[in-house]
Amino acid sequence: MDNYRLFIQKQQTFFRTEKTKDVSFRIEALQKLRKAIQENEQLLIDALRADLNKSEFDAYTTEIGIVLEEISFTLKHIDTWVKPKREKTPVSHLGSTSFVYPEPYGTVLIIAPWNYPFQLAAAPLIGAIAAGNCAVIKPSELTPTTSEAFARLISEIFPEDYIAVVQGGIETSQALLEEKFDYIFFTGSVPIGRIIMEAAAKNLTPVTLELGGKSPCIVHGDANLKLAAKRIAWGKYINAGQTCVAPDYLYLQKDIKNEFLAFFKEAITELYSNAPLQNPDFTRIVTEKHFDRLSTFLDNGTLCTGGKTNREKLLIEPTVLTDITWSDPVMQDEIFGPILPVLEYQTLDEAIEGIDNHPKPLALYIFSESEPIQKKIVQSVSFGGGCINDTVYHLGSPYLPFGGVGNSGMGAYHGKGSFDTFSHKKSILKQTTLFDIPYRYPNVKGGLRKIRRFLK
């Protein structure tokens, strides 16, 4: 598949046969995908273990299970989603009816990241298939075992002129971006997102960018501190912090800082033992380059807990840093690792100002028992999505579209959101021929006067 242009042209030719527009074809494709995932579950679990040392529990709950649930949800609702939706028609259009037809874009490109290498390749694909598109998926070269397993799975159930996986490094992504796709879906970092958008702009190709950013986690004084500590530790350190919606930093109200951090240390021990580096199921950092970048943050502020590393195994303990300010290196970019810096605030307005002075985050989490405080944060701060009194969990709901805003991305997916993302909304007005509306014509006497009654 070195000649990408010829390869993509074959998909475009297949799309023009209109087979993918048949809803029964889409349903059959989704059923094939589900069956293949179920039959290759152990292969995927082993691949994720090889690439990131993910446990079977993490591999299933954060990757395989989420994808299977997404397929089931889509199959349950696709018959409704594909139907044209009748819309209201104004009085000025008397005699006509209005409809919106969802139609597939054509051939779409999906570029997936390394942190959840199966889920973040397969989940967008589900939406692309459901919407009736052909698709090319470029998985990450940093998780080669999972990418190879995914490529093999797809090649065994779909012809390349319908769905295909293209493996390779940066040069492969660059070559694909030079081609004309009908839609591009990218998950990854903000700097690469800018490159994707620049490449898409050359062909006026619409894009969805699922990026990241520094997602704050606010713990107010009235929160259930022990439960908050456990839920935050889970959300932060799952996948060794290599999650786009992981809490990137803690914003603690000063009065409860010490009490909360004591609970937080207990939660880390409960979840990952007294010696996380010896825990056989603790996820490793993906590459030495990423490990070295994260290690430079460990001397920022004051080490509260954790901090030990094993470069040979690419492991970093769940770590908490206190006495941190916005000027510290750890606060300049998304951390994407098991290091959690702590900022303090006295009043809620102080926390809101700190967040607002920086790029809009992909996620935000607020822990408080007060509905007015919850409401103030949700209404005052711009962010992609998040949770009240929890972390990360919003990501798993097919009823909630997931996506960013500003620097953290554009567009959304999951559930119907995925179908909508990969569908163009074609608006159609069907006019009657039983009569005509004469006053719309410029030669009709008094036509303007009548038009003014409607258009004002």
Image: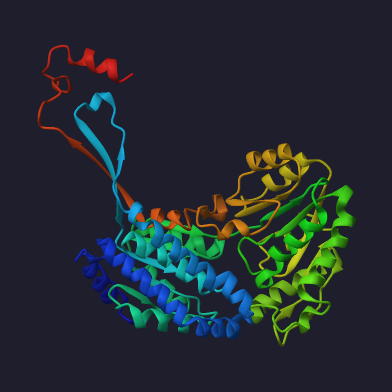
Q: Position of residue 66 (x, y in %)?
A: 53, 67
**Quarter of the C terminus within the rendering:** top left
Residue 327 can be seen, yes or no: no
Q: Residue at x 43, y 54 (%)?
A: 416
Query: In this picture, is 320 found above or below 377?
Result: below
Relative to 305, 381 lies left or right:
left
Q: Residue at x 33, y 70 (%)?
A: 29
Relative to 356, 188 lies left or right:
left
Relative to 358, 265 lies left or right:
right
Q: Position of residue 194 (x, y in %)?
A: 50, 60
Residue 102 can be seen, yes or no: yes
Query: In this picture, is 96 found above or below 163?
Result: above
Choose between 441 and 418: the one closer to the eye.
Answer: 418
Q: Position of residue 401 (x, y in %)?
A: 50, 53
**Quarter of the N terminus within the rendering:** bottom left
Q: Residue at x 77, y 62 (%)?
A: 230
Query: In this picture, is 112 found above or below 354?
Result: below
**Residue 444 picture quarter:** top left
Relative to 136, 242 lies left or right:
right
Query: In this picture, is 428 found above or below 243?
Result: above
Choose between 63 and 421: the one closer to the eye.
Answer: 63
Q: Residue at x 23, y 70 (%)?
A: 14
